[in-house]
Image: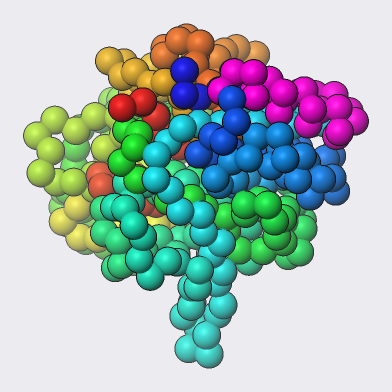
Amino acid sequence: MPFASALSEHPVPAMATGETAGALLEAIGERPDLVVVTTTRTHAGALEDIVKTVNAVLHPLAMVGCATGSVVAAGHRSGETPAIGLWAGQVGPLAQVHLRAARQSDDTWRFTGWPAATAFEPRALVLVADPFTFPVGEFLTWLRMRQPGLPVIGGNASGMRGPGGARLVVGTEVVASGAAGVLIGGGVEIEPVVAQGCRAYGRPLTVTRSERNLIHEIAGRQALECLADQMKSGLDPVDLATIGSGDLLVGRLIDDRLDRPGPGDYLVRTVVGADRSTGAVAVEDRVPVGCTIKFHHRDTLAARAELLTLLQGRYADAVLMFAGTTRTAQLFEGGPSDTGMLVRSLGPIPVTGILSAGEVGPIGGYNFVHGSTASMALLRDR
């Protein structure tokens, strides 16, 4: 097996590093192409030593990772307790990147660290970012002009309180800003899967009047009136009685060429307000005139059903996963976790990742920043 993962919750960083690095050495041997290093914030101060030890034991070609609020490794999710997760894989050609961002005088962003050329054709970018110093949304727009169609899977490290608190792994270095990433070539098949934790209801509708993030009319009717009708006809009484403000969602179809769009085809955004006097509905994203939308509802059953639907018929030899902290806390407590459902659907394969403060993944061929989402890279050995 060209992939392996290990998790240790030993409170002493040296012991935890020895346990996980030793497990990977036994499972996959020396010189894997890529090692992903994740630790909880408790071990953040020891991350330099952890990285040096992992490098001395495994000698990987590239390393990427971070200290974050909670880690996922070896099919399990750590709590707030000390934990180190390691994942190793033979993925073929790759290029490690340390991306930096600087705001310009005209309020635009300048990004550095992207390679001018690589010796292979990149098939995906795995990215871990510091949300205080690296604007992922602006970077995705920048990247779209330079590398159109390149899927980005990743997320923001969680658990930090401000700039300077990041601990990102870039090779054998630990840095406090920017984003750590790895470009992966064609030595492994990578399939992105983005589960947004919700289900659609009602019927597809066309936005007929909008302004930036305000939807004024849907199918020629006031947007608020249309939302109310769709809720009454599409949700059961229990959902209507318990629905919260954060559960009102609008899904925008990204690829209008699809005949039968389903889960994973709509970019879901939260309804953040409404004006009863005008009937306008505000969404946390731009909604252009002419786009197709469908209202969505987020709850535990919907999140689990969507994930199972998206994984149905797929297979993988390993998974890298970035799951939202709010998704885990609100949707998967008291039942099978994202990780547990992945293993249930795909088998006992190496799954690793982090709980993130904003996830990155493609919808309809375009990369977006998400919330309460699980963004996953399904890897298959060629």
Where residue 101 sits, quadrant-wise, is: bottom right
* Residue placed furthest toward the right: 12
| Image location (x, y in percent) of residue 292 | 19, 46
Using the image, determine if residue 86 lies above or below residue 209: above
Residue at the image point whose x is 48% and y is 73% from the top: 111
| Residue range of the region highlighted in magenta in the rendering | 8-28
Residue 113, how many percent across, how many down? 50, 68
Instruction: Based on the picture, tell me whether residue 373 belongs to the magenta stretch.
Output: no
The coloring applied to the image is: rainbow
Question: Is residue 21 magenta-colored?
Answer: yes
Task: Decide: is 34 above or below 106.
Answer: above
Residue at the spot x=59%, y=25% of the render? 29
* Drawn side of residue 149 relative to residue 165, left or right: left
Q: Is residue 14 left or right of residue 96?
A: right
Vertical placement of 291 versus 314: above or below?
Answer: below
The residue at the point 31 percent across, 27 percent down is 382
